[in-house]
Amino acid sequence: PGNNAFTIRHDGLNKCLQVKKSWILMDDCKETSEALWKWVSQNRLFHLGSRQCLGLDIVTKLPSRLKMVDCNSELMLWWRCADASIIGASQYKVTLVNNFVTASINASDQWRSNNSSDDICRYPYHEIYTKDGNSYGKPCEFPFLYNDTWHHDCIQDETHTGGKWCATSEDYTHDGKWGICLQPEDGCQDIWEHDPGAKSCYQFNTQSALSWKEAYISCQKQGGDLLSIQDASELSYVQGKDDIAEIFWIGLNQLDVSGGWQWSDHKPLNFVNWHPGNDMQSLSPLDGTSCVAMNAASGQWQSYHCGTQLPYVCKKPFDEASSLPEFWRHLDTQCDTGWLPHNGFCYMLIHNQVPWSSADQLCKANKSNLISVHSLADVELVVTKLHNDAKEEVWMGLRNKDVPTLFKWSDHSAVDFTYWDQNEPKVPFNITPNCVSYSGKLGQWRVKSCEEKLKYVCKKRGEILNETKSDKSCSYDEGWEMHGNYCYTIYKTEVSFGSQCNLTVTNRFEQEFINSLIRKYTKVEEKYFWTGLQDISHTGTYSWGAVDGEKNEAVTYTNWNSLQPEFSGGCVAMPSGRSVGKWETKDCKTTKAFSVCKKYIGLPKEPEVLPKPSDPCPPGWHNGSGLACYKFFHSERVLRTRTWEEAERFCEALGGHLPSFTNTEEIKALHSILRRIISNDRWVWIGMNKRSPDSLGTWQWSDDKPVTCLFIHESTWKKYSCQLYIGFRLTAEMFSLYGKKLLVFPLLIYSSYCISLI
């Protein structure tokens, strides 16, 4: 069905929920208006045939508590999903009693969408933002009442010109609030402007007033992104528009607390034009201004609190058919003695510490250049091969000599990738040159004085021995490809879970390599590929299956898709296409997918040495469950509460993070400590959040621990409307941490969707 419409099928009876003459009944599953539903604003279920919403009457004495009512009814109209149940207020669930449709607290009925194993939240409501009109860019309200009819989609008539429109409040006849719908369109027509020089299209939403995240979503839903600026010519083009707003959102942000400033469309950040008042050298990590707006007059950029209401500019490529370069192909490479061969290049780490210019000259004297980094594959080389996680600062070939700042590689290669550390790039105003180092532990980049003395890495081209048969350890001719100490292949036969391979994914580098494999093998239609991740105990905790009789690997990394993990008891697969490699829960018995297989070809593995849970915590820290230590800020700082971002940044400054949990025992341990030291009515931040645009609306831990459990279903959490997270819009962005050090703060600001321990 189109427009995200779906049928609601009873899993046991195999009949569908229909509405005929306002009566709710079960009938054969045909995709007619009588059987089609869709999610609309405020978590309501809208019936296309009757143009009414499903209501819940919990005080009635009639046999059925369910009623079809107008969508502005005073009845309870919000619904959510959990384990294929449809749940309303007071835990009432939609159920069948003697073939009669009603709602009951004790029901266990499961409802599926269409002829699939998915629950009805597979088709969530997505907001559509507006422009022009009189609503300052606010999103549509669906359904809206116009001419005595409830409309569940944008409409076009003679009332408003400029395209399809919608109301931005429930009753257009009464309120008159409206806007032109911003929906995906091919090419650069109507509301987009084409700049031939930049091969991009731009949309200037001058009359809008949205937060950064709202503006980002508006651009994303149209197939674009918030504006990124790659050079001075693009900056001049944007500045030269006559109808541009004075200050407007651009895509620059540092909402991912593990890294620095980045463009939301993942373009490289090597052109920088900070406002002089936005001094990155003195900006406190507790400042909380994580989103950037541009001043049209000066062209300079200023950081703001992300909730500030501003106009915005969207950008999308003029030509969608852009292919990604191949970074992950293994090439058997030969180098001179003392150089490290890797995928066509040779590398040498020099331990003698010198200024940047000396390092540059010494590399050139050795017929090489300072290292340039062009992808996560190069970052993996730096972290795992050159430094082996050592905490050291090393010169790379990136340097700026210009105002405004434009970083360039000393080997004259293109800057097509950047990987900045927290609060970077910190570029002093009007002071050049500026040079860049990287961290040997995480590979992230920092701006340094060029006179500082550091180690450095030289890079030069190596001799590729046989490009057509480079993976000699992995039988490339038979479809195997090498990454690290493993060989990988894809079996393009759809099988049930567990039939082949039980793939494990241990970090983001391996995930990116697997994504590159999937892209090669699926050029057109979307397909799924099994991993070995499964909730075998049906407790909501996902773990890796055993491979070749070995002990199960610990889950060290997760890559969930939006609104995942969706249910307990599932098996995890990865799609191709737009969400390539993102993890989704699937029915273990009915779903079939391709397999990604890997085999180990390295030296025998040595047992990993882990810290002992009995090791003492530092002074002032409390022992928690497992390897966790906690430090609390409560009574002595009762007047200094912090926002989530301030609390997380403060924890990082002390070598920790906000709390995270990988199992319920860790929750209970922290809960027990909290009960002893603070009162029951206190709230504290934890590290779970979905601030990063890359998270696709999925919860993540601020310390990058894997999210392996369906924590949101646990009664341990205190969260207003917390169960609404599956299939509905959840605007909260704050959740909590794990690590060797954990900190807990009192709560300053929490919306009704925030999650905290009580």
Image: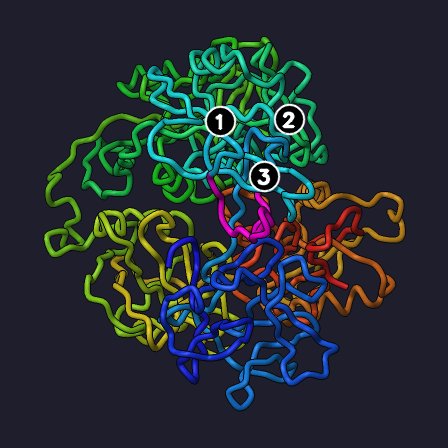
Quadrant assignment for the N terminus = bottom left
Would residue 544 be visible to someone looking at this image?
A: no
> Against 494, is 231 above or below?
above
Identify the mark at residue 683; answer none if there is no mark.
none
- Foreground label between 2 and 1: 1
Q: From the viewer's perspective, is 260 left or right of 58?
A: left
Closer-to-camera residue (211/23): 23
Identify the mark at residue 213; answer none if there is no mark.
3
Q: From the viewer's perspective, is 441 left or right of 105?
A: left
Q: Position of residue 192 (x, y in %)?
A: 42, 26
The span from disc 2 to disc 3 (Cα, nearest Å) is 14 Å
Quadrant assignment for the C terminus = bottom right
Q: Residues within 10 Å of mark 2 (few under 14, many from 20)?
A: many
* Residue at horizontal 61 percent and vertical 79 percent from the top: 103
Instruction: Provide the residue designation for mark 2.
Output: 303
* Residue at horizontal 25 percent and vertical 53 percent from the top: 525
Is 102 one of the magenta-colored residues?
no
Circles 2 and 3, Cβ within 8 Å, touching? The answer is no
Q: Position of residue 71 (x, y in %)?
A: 62, 59
Identify the mark at residue 227; answer none if there is no mark.
1
Closer-to-camera residue (692/449): 692
Which stretch is magenta?
Answer: 140-156
